[in-house]
Image (spheres, helix red, strand yellow):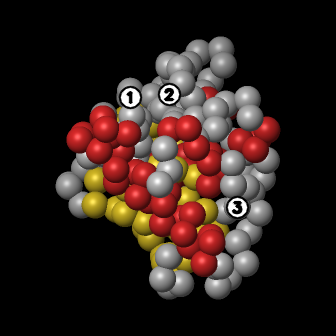
Amino acid sequence: MITMEDIIKEGHPTLRQVAKEVELPASEEEKKILAEMLQYLKNSQDPEIAEKYGLRPGIGLAAPQINVSKRMIAVHVTDEKGKLYSYGLFNPKIVSHSVEQSYLTSGEGCLSVDREVPGYVPRYARIRVKGVDLEGNEVDLRLKGLVAIVFQHEIDHLNGIMFYDRINKENPFKEPENATPIDR
């Protein structure tokens, strides 16, 4: 079981590396790690389990955050309409995206960052992501809103990018051009 102790913090060199592709089919070890990442998110969103194990609630987790420099992400998040997106993906890629942008009005947080980093993080409003799930099936997702933001945040981790790298340094609360605000 992944706990908060397994999650590395900003400043750790693995968070700034470009993660390696997972050779498919994934090994049993890689499947186990990815399944545990997804289970962490589910556990962290369950108030009783989260309290018992001291888990910080999360909606996304990338393998580099547990010091595994491989292209694997887990996402467990509900969209604006209450639809659950629960995925563990190997080698996720954004294959297309909108010109329009969006951002969370509350800013973004990260399990690897133990401080508030105020500011808007511009993201694509709509994306299409391809990857391979835990069962080895190809997945092709068209995402928008909060879910699209979560996937972009996690895929950034695979490229050594932290969310605050995208915040406008001069004016953190400058609204990104052509962007839709998303309240969460």
Q: Position of residue 150 (x, y in %)?
A: 46, 49
Helix, strand or loop at disc 3?
loop
For this rendering, which residue is in front, 4 or 93?
4
Q: Which residue is mark 1?
A: 105
Q: Quadrant of the C terminus?
A: top left
Q: Residue at x 70, y 61 (%)?
A: 70
What residue appears at the point 62 percent right and 55 percent down from the top-left corner?
A: 63
**Which residue type carries mark 1?**
Thr
Front residue of 159 and 46: 46
Badge 2: few (under 14), some or many (20 or more) residues near its Cα, within 10 Å? many
Circle 1: element type = loop
Residue occupied by mark 2: 120
Q: Which amino acid type corresponds to the residue marked 3 in the rendered image?
A: Lys
Q: Earlier in the sequence, mark 3 or mark 2?
A: 3
Label 1 or label 2, whichever comes before in sequence order: 1
Q: Is residue 33 above or below residue 136?
A: above
Q: Position of residue 52 (x, y in %)?
A: 31, 38
Residue 40 seen in the current view:
yes
Q: Amino acid at mark 2?
A: Tyr
Q: Position of residue 42 (x, y in %)?
A: 34, 54
Instruction: Say above or below: 71 vs 44.
Output: below
Q: Which mark is residue 70?
A: 3
Q: Quadrant of residue 16?
A: top right
Residue 153 lies left or right of residue 103; in this view the side is: right
The image shows residue 73, relative to residue 152, as above or below, that is below
